[in-house]
Amino acid sequence: MIGVILAQGKGLRLRPITRVIPKNLIVINGKPIIEHQIDYLHKYGINNVYVITSGYEKVWENFRKSHDVTILSSPEPLGTAGCLTLLNVSDDMIVMNGDVLTTIDLNQLIRCDQQFIGCISLVKMRSPYGIVKVEKNYVVSFEEKPLLPHLINAGVYYFRPDVLDLVSEGDMFEDKVLPMLASLRLLGFVNYDNVEWRSIDSTKDIESSTRPQ
């Protein structure tokens, strides 16, 4: 089993920070996002970790010198799925978006039914806004950013190596590879409740992630 962290995003919504470092190296609660992810993978015995990058060559080279990971790089981003073409492996894999912090149980993904090529993690969507409940002509209550009944892709996947035969440079998981696997009934899922999950996409996400609990 290998771990693959997707770190090719440009982090445009996190500028000016990402003019200097990739967003994966933004510090959250004392250490970079990617170190949280590496520790998370190690917790499940996944010690062979690949980080797929684009740009920031010197930054990633310095990171590699101090961490036991394999850096795979391309001059330009190859797509969230297309970047897997850089891998030359025959192992099952956990693939993670490079901006996700979570406590979901990977063992549940790894136990994915053998009929599937991949299995995705699902979590309930949290409203970005507070919700106002009303009845008739009056307000009943306010609820601050509740979990909604809709399920979203949590950006953590389990794949068998067969998936590498199905991806090409430029492919995106969201609009090609996952829908294709779903249409073939080759994509399973695990629906997670009562887990921590957040994606670091903006300065507001950084602030909320580092705020004392």
Image: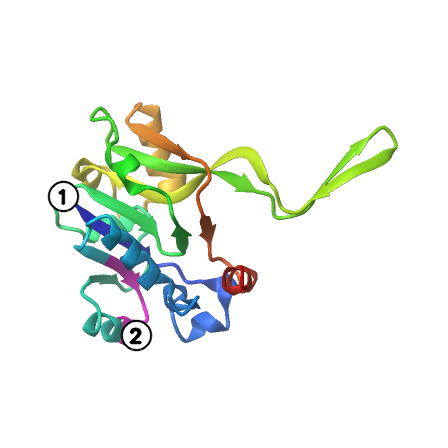
Q: In which quarter of the image is the C terminus?
A: bottom right
Residue 143 place in picture, x, y as percent:
68, 43
Name which quarter of the figure residue 184 lies in: top left
The way the protein has been coloured in the rendering is rainbow
Position in image of residue 108 (x %, y %): 29, 35
Residue occupied by mark 1: 91
Q: Is disc 1 surrounded by few (<14), some (14 to 19) or many (20+) residues within 10 Å?
A: few
Which amino acid, mark 1? Asp
Range drawn in magenta: 51-60
Give the alpha-carbon distance from disc 1 to disc 2, as whole Å.
28 Å
Which residue is located at x 25 percent, y 59 percent? Answer: 51
Q: In this view, does 189 lie above or below 46?
A: above
> What residue is disc 2 on?
59
Kind of residue sitting beneath label 2:
Val
- Left or right: residue 68 versus residue 184 is left
Q: Residue 171 carries which label?
A: none
Q: What residue is shown at x 30% (from left), y 53% (from top)? A: 40
Residue placed most toward the observer, 88 or 208: 208
Label 2: which secondary element: helix
Viewer-nearest residue: 2 or 46: 46
**In the image, residue 35 lies at what x, y percent?**
31, 63
Q: Position of residue 87 (x, y in %)?
A: 17, 51
- Figure check: 172 above or below 190: below
Of the residues under marks 1 and 2, which one precedes in the sequence? 2
Q: Which residue is drawn at 47% across and 51% down?
A: 198
Q: Quadrant of the N terminus?
A: top left
Left or right, 146 with respect to 178, comes to right
Are the residues flagged by discs 1 and 2 in contact, CB closer than 8 Å?
A: no
Residue that sits furthest to the front in the current view:
213
Q: Does the magenta stretch include residue 209?
A: no
